[in-house]
Amino acid sequence: MSQAIFSHNGQIKPSDAAVISVSNIEYAYGFGVYESMKLRKGILYFLSQHVQRLLQSAQEIELEHPFTTEEIASWIQTLVNNLDTDSCNLKILLIGSKQPEDCSLYIIPLAPLYPDRKLYKKGAKVICFPYERWKPNSKSLNMLPSYYYYGKAKQVGCYDCLFVDNHGFICEGSRTNFFCIKEQTLYTPPLAKILEGVTYQTIIHVAKQNGYQVVEQDIRPEELPNYEGAFLSSTSSKIMPLRQIDEFAFDSISESLKELMQLYNVFLEECQGEFRF
């Protein structure tokens, strides 16, 4: 925790009070969902979309709770107003309970994450692992495989890993969405198989607004040479171009991908943290 305070069910408390009992069986078994948001230079990005997805994730795993969209958004904003920094990441944890009224919602400020800037010019390297997430449309606390494979990727010098499902199709990264690109068309794995990130949503919006086409289709690792490039997306990384996936390497970052990266950066600068479909 990078700040001296956090929020629990709307109450701001000192960070040393941020404890979860060892007898909390729901937390121990991962019966909860989470979201990660970013605050940069005083701008809180895409608040309503993150809260909405948190509640959708809870619904997906049948986690009943008493919290409303409005009060969660208000609690997040109140915590931000009381921080002594204008840039951080926020982690929102919704932990279930046997009784809905006993659920807990934590909002925790963390140090901001900034990927190495060189990666945006040179492209990042990733490695594939066979893994298929349970209930992929929910951002649940069942993250052990993601944590494990992400660590394995880091051990061999990779930025992240990609998960390949039981049918041999690339789905997503351990904490990122995955795209391929060819000329003015983006290709993304079918939404039913992945977690639709908030950054994912805004990238697609920017792409369509600027004449790009978006196609949902299955993508096999052996089909990567059919595309001009590929990239990952996440709250912290925005659009991260990929240089290499396993042993396959792209010749360069394509011009269409460079253009999309620039368009998305302009969108983030101009949107003031708001996104409306």
Image (cartoon, rainbow, N blue to C red):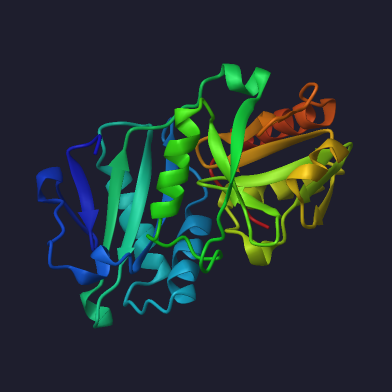
Residue appearing at x 69%, y 30% in the figure: 247
Camera-side residue: 208 or 159? 159
Position of 64 compared to 236: left or right?
left
Camera-side residue: 85 or 136? 136
The image position of residue 125, as x and y in percent, is 61, 28
Camera-side residue: 156 or 4? 156
Where is the C terminus found, in terms of image quarters? bottom right
The image position of residue 53, as x and y in percent, is 50, 62
In the depicted structure, whether residue 266 falls above or below residue 46? above
- Total number of numbered labels? 0
Give the farthest residue toward the bottom. Answer: 99
Position of 101 compared to 163: left or right?
left
Kindly tell me whether residue 104 is visible in this rendering: no
In the figure, residue 176 lies in which quadrant? top right
Residue appearing at x 19%, y 43% in the figure: 5
Residue appearing at x 41%, y 46% in the figure: 147
The image position of residue 15, as x and y in percent, is 15, 44
Kindly tell me whether residue 20 is visible in this rendering: yes
Camera-side residue: 79 or 124? 124
In the depicted structure, whether residue 104 falls above or below residue 88? below
The image position of residue 13, as x and y in percent, is 14, 51
Where is the N terminus found, in terms of image quarters? top left
Position of 213 compared to 193: left or right?
right
In the depicted structure, whether residue 174 falls above or below residue 57? above
